[in-house]
Image (cartoon, rainbow, N blue to C red):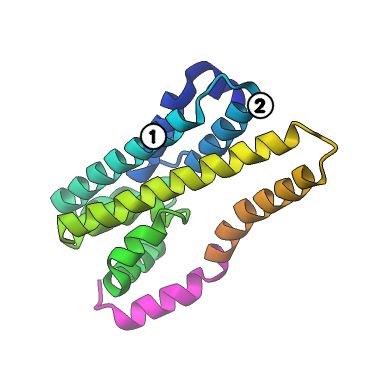
Amino acid sequence: MTEFISTYGVWLVAGFIALETIGAPLPAEAAIMAAGFFAARTHDLDIRMLIIVGSLAAILGNAAGFWIGRRYGYHLLTRYGHRVGLTEARIRIGQWLFVRYGGRFVFIARFLPFLRNMAAILAGANAMPQPLFHVASGTAAIAWVALYSLASYRLGEAFADMASSAAIGLGVVAIAIIVAIPSLILRYEERLLAKAESELPPS
């Protein structure tokens, strides 16, 4: 990933972020972390530019996803979602979370795999007020990009001194977070689906 980052810079990361936001199964988080780490180790990439361009890409991806959801609704997700890992069960869970939590779901979904891919489309399909959506999704996009960019940047700085115990500790924490979040989602997926089926009207 760092080899691609060194060649194509922030624009590759921006493309990953925008496309993942509207459903493409791309490793946007990994791209941001690789770019942040690369920026710290080589200084060939400006971390501020990474945050600015990455945030804009996430915001534009949200806007595109919202429009797609408003224009095509759930039909698009149910027909093509399985091709990018959005199974019928996950779509149902996302629908329930959106109905129950609204703007809070849009914000939190930015930080969660699978849900991030469909949050904007769900918001559009559910006719969420556009100003509320842009506030929730925009603040989440900036926070998400800044968090992952700066965390990986600091991690790269720490690893510059391989004798630093902080480098080892930060590396372990970063790996644990990346592995833990998807695992927790998968672990509670059946429980969330049961709640969704009990509270939502039949599809």
> In the image, residue 149 lies at what x, y percent?
52, 40
- Which residue corresponds to mark 2? 41
In space, the residues marked 2 and 1 are separated at their CA atoms by 20 Å
Looking at the rendered image, the quarter that the C terminus falls into is: bottom left
Which secondary structure is most common in the magenta stretch? helix
Q: Is residue 67 visible?
A: yes
Residue situated in front as seen by the camera: 93 or 60: 60
Residue sitting at the far top: 7
Q: Is residue 74 visible?
A: no
Residue at image location 16% in from the left, 55% down from the top: 130
Residue situated in front as seen by the camera: 3 or 96: 3
Q: Secondary structure at mark 2?
A: helix
Q: Amino acid at mark 2?
A: Arg
Q: Where does the magenta region start and end?
A: 186-203
Mark seen at residue 73: none
Residue sitting at the far bottom: 198
How many numbered marks does the figure carry? 2
Residue at image location 65% in from the left, 49% down from the top: 174
- Which residue corresponds to mark 1? 52
